[in-house]
């Protein structure tokens, strides 16, 4: 197993851990700061252990994201998508139907033309 897979597995574990920690945090009320009130609660509350864990996981997640980007850039350096295309033999296209073939309505002189009659 190469280092790219190890970093990817750590990245996925961090992502799941970050999701879990964020969902476990106590709601402070007022999503996105709406209805925050004011008054004596204007000062910042001291950081709880849960918020410190969240910050740690977030920083580690960003670091693994940058590491995966660097690894992908190194793996792709010097190559192009066009370089990866294998010259496959091109087969001849099937013959197209002749004009007046099955896709067209029958011509009047062929006897296949049915004209609807109003009764």
Image (cartoon, rainbow, N blue to C red):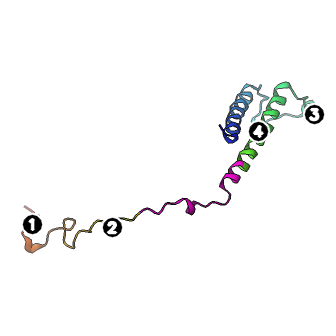
Marks 3 and 1, how far apart in space? Answer: 89 Å
Q: Position of residue 46 (x, y in %)?
A: 91, 28
Mark 3, residue position? 43
Query: Measuring 10% from the left and 73% from the top, which residue is drawn there?
Result: 108
In the visual, does 88 lie left or right of 98?
right
- Mark 3, Cα crowd under 10 Å, few <14 / some 14-19 / many 20+, is few
Q: Quadrant of the N terminus?
A: top right
How far is the residue under mark 4 from the one under mark 3? 17 Å
Instruction: Between label 1 and label 4, give the one nearer the viewer.
Output: 1
Q: Is residue 80 left or right of residue 93?
A: right
Q: Which residue is mark 1?
A: 112
Query: Can you see residue 23?
Result: yes
Distance (Cα) linking label 2 and label 1: 34 Å
Give the structural element (helix, strand or loop) at label 1.
loop
Which disc, if any, is residue 32?
Answer: 4
In the displayed structure, 114 sits above or below 18; it is: below
Q: Give the residue at mark 2.
A: 92
């Amino acid at each position: 197993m190469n280092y790219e897979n190890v970093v990817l597995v750590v990245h996925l574990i961090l992502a799941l851990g970050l999701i879990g920690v964020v969902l476990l945090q106590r709601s402070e009320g007022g999503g996105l700061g709406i209805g925050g009130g004011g008054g004596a609660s204007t000062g910042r509350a001291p950081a709880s252990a849960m918020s410190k864990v969240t910050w740690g996981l977030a920083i580690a997640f960003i670091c693994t994201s940058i590491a995966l980007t660097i690894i992908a850039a190194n793996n792709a350096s010097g190559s192009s998508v066009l370089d990866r295309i294998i010259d496959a033999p091109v087969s001849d296209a099937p013959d197209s139907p002749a004009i007046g073939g099955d896709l067209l309505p029958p011509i009047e002189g062929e006897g296949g033309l049915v004209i609807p009659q109003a009764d």
